[in-house]
């Protein structure tokens, strides 16, 4: 039997979702939690490899299990063995062919910015602090050129290992509520650091530090023309979308 789980986590103290040598990851904690409820040799697929310090409200992973337990027995059992900054929030029984990554239609990320001359220390783990005044209207207008299928070489890490730099951005929203700005992006998939570089570029556009149009940066296919890679603390993985699996849909925006 294959189960797909939706989880939330605060990524501040982790090396990312995927297991790594000499660093603690979300996946490591999940494997330990399964062992705590007598499930060994867990083989896990997951919808998105979030980087060090990145948070999630709707990460999805799937595993094959032989035990027959109720949904709440699975959820409560795992949560009782997980640290307080990781939580299983839902699950669904899926077909044996289901794959959390390859069956995802798209994925949505939210980046949160605290825009104020003064720092708010209570928001440090979840918001990027931007002191300068931003031209939100200009950022919105410039961002429209990114929608659609493009080569996003300008917006990926130089160490990105993907052979294909093309991605399809389906939606970009830039919303402001008081001092909080959210940049939310939905795409079929993302390159390494793609969201953080897009956000960094949009911030520099909003501060008029970048003079050339965003469309030219995109078409140049040159990472040097884009903005800085912003801190991971403001990045939240809202989750993937799947056909006919409503229990695992992405979480709502943190601003709503």
Image (cartoon, grey):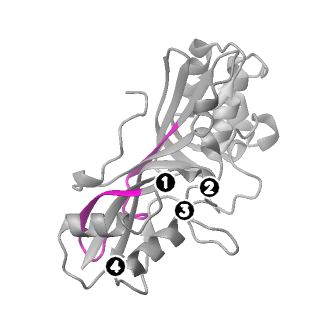
Measure the C-alpha gap from mark 1 to mark 2. Answer: 9 Å
Which of the two labelled residues, at mark 1 and mark 2, occupies the earlier sequence position? 2
Magenta-drawn segment: 87-110
Which of the two labelled residues, at mark 4 and mark 3, occupies the earlier sequence position? 3
Q: Residue at x 61, y 59 (%)?
A: 14
Residue 140 position by quadrant = top right
Q: Residue at x 20, y 65 (%)?
A: 71
Measure the C-alpha gap from mark 2 to mark 3. Answer: 11 Å
CB of mark 3 within 8 Å of CB of mark 1? no
Which of the two labelled residues, at mark 4 and mark 2, occupies the earlier sequence position? 2
Which residue is the site of mark 3?
A: 17
Residue 15: percent from left, percent from top: 64, 61
Which of the two labelled residues, at mark 1 and mark 4, occupies the earlier sequence position? 4
Residue 61 position by quadrant = bottom left
Residue 204: percent from left, percent from top: 73, 24
Of badges 2 and 3, nearer the viewer stands 2
Of the 4 image quadrants, the one containing the C terminus is top left
- 256 to the left or right of 56: left
* Any part of residue 210 in sight: yes
Measure the C-alpha gap from mark 1 to mark 4. Answer: 19 Å
Measure the C-alpha gap from mark 4 to mark 2. Answer: 24 Å
Q: Residues within 10 Å of mark 2 (few under 14, many from 20)?
A: few
Question: What label sits on residue 13 in the rendered view?
Answer: 2
User: Does 237 sit above or below residue 220?
Assistant: below
Within the magenta stretch, is there residue 95?
Answer: yes
Q: Could you say whether the residue bearing mark 3 is in a helix, strand or loop?
A: loop
Which residue is the site of mark 1?
A: 85
Q: Residue at x 71, y 29 (%)?
A: 216
Of badges 4 and 3, nearer the viewer stands 4
Measure the C-alpha gap from mark 3 to mark 1. Answer: 13 Å
CB of mark 1 within 8 Å of CB of mark 2? yes
């Amino acid at each position: 039997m294959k189960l797909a789980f939706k989880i939330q986590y605060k990524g501040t103290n982790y090396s990312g979702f995927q297991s790594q040598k000499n660093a603690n990851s979300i996946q490591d904690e999940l494997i330990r939690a399964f062992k705590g409820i007598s499930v060994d040799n867990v083989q896990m697929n997951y919808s998105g490899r979030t980087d060090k310090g990145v948070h999630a409200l709707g990460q999805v992973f799937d595993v094959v299990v032989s035990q027959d337990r109720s949904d709440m027995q699975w959820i409560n059992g795992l949560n009782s063995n997980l640290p307080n900054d990781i939580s299983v929030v839902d699950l669904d029984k899926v077909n044996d062919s289901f794959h959390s990554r390859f069956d995802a239609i798209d994925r949505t990320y939210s980046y949160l910015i605290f825009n104020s001359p003064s720092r708010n220390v209570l928001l440090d783990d979840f918001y990027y602090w931007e002191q300068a005044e931003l031209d939100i209207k200009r950022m919105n207008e410039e961002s429209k050129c990114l929608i659609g299928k493009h080569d996003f070489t300008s917006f990926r890490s130089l160490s990105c290992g993907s052979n294909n730099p093309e991605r399809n951005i389906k939606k970009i929203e830039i919303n402001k509520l008081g001092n909080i700005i959210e940049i939310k992006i939905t795409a079929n998939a993302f390159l390494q650091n793609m969201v953080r570089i897009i956000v960094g570029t949009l911030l520099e556009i909003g501060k008029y530090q970048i003079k050339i149009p965003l469309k030219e940066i995109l078409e140049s296919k040159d990472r040097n023309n884009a903005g800085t890679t912003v801190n991971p603390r403001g990045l939240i993985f809202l989750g993937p979308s799947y056909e006919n699996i409503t229990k695992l849909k992405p979480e709502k925006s943190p601003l709503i």
